[in-house]
Amino acid sequence: MKQYFFYVLYTADGYFYGGFTDDVARRFATHVKRQGAKFTRVKSRHPLQLVFSQAFDSKSEALHAEAVFKRLTRAKKEVFLAENGVSATIWQK
């Protein structure tokens, strides 16, 4: 069964970017090469850090997780990440 992933990047200018893919490493490499989403192509956003990923059994579940994350406030995104084992030191620089 093919898996899909929801992932979160942290940008050099302090933003969280949520996305979905069927291959996290490949998608992250695309973002790093500035060939991914328009949001991550901006020079000031680099370097990027992959801070979280979660596997799902269906594309719709991964898309739903991405949509829910994108609707969260900054504070709630931080809570979500902390509750899922991401160290707050990443965004508290």
Image (cartoon, grey):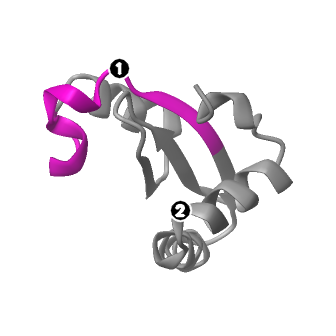
The quadrant holding residue 89 is: top right
- Locate residue 38, reporting x and y percent: 15, 49
Residue at the (41%, 46%) spot, across then down:
15
Q: Alpha-carbon neighbours of circle 1 within 10 Å: few (<14), some, or many (≥20)?
A: few
Residue 68 in view? yes
- Locate residue 76, reporting x and y percent: 65, 68
Task: Tell me the number on the disc at residue 86.
Answer: none
Residue at the (63%, 29%) spot, across then down:
90
The quadrant holding residue 29 is: top left
Q: CA distance from mark 2 to mark 1?
A: 20 Å
Task: Tell me the number on the disc at residue 74.
Answer: 2
Secondary structure beneath label 1: loop
Residue range corresponding to the magenta coloring: 35-52
Q: Nearer the viewer, residue 69 or 13?
A: 13
As drawn, is 5 to the left or to the right of 63? right
Q: Is residue 74 above or below residue 47?
A: below
Q: Is residue 61 above or below residue 27?
A: below
Secondary structure beneath label 2: helix
Task: Tell me the number on the disc at residue 47.
Answer: 1
- Locate residue 24, reporting x and y percent: 51, 39
What kind of residue is marked 1? Pro
Residue at the (41%, 32%) spot, across then down:
28
- State the quadrant of the N terminus: bottom right
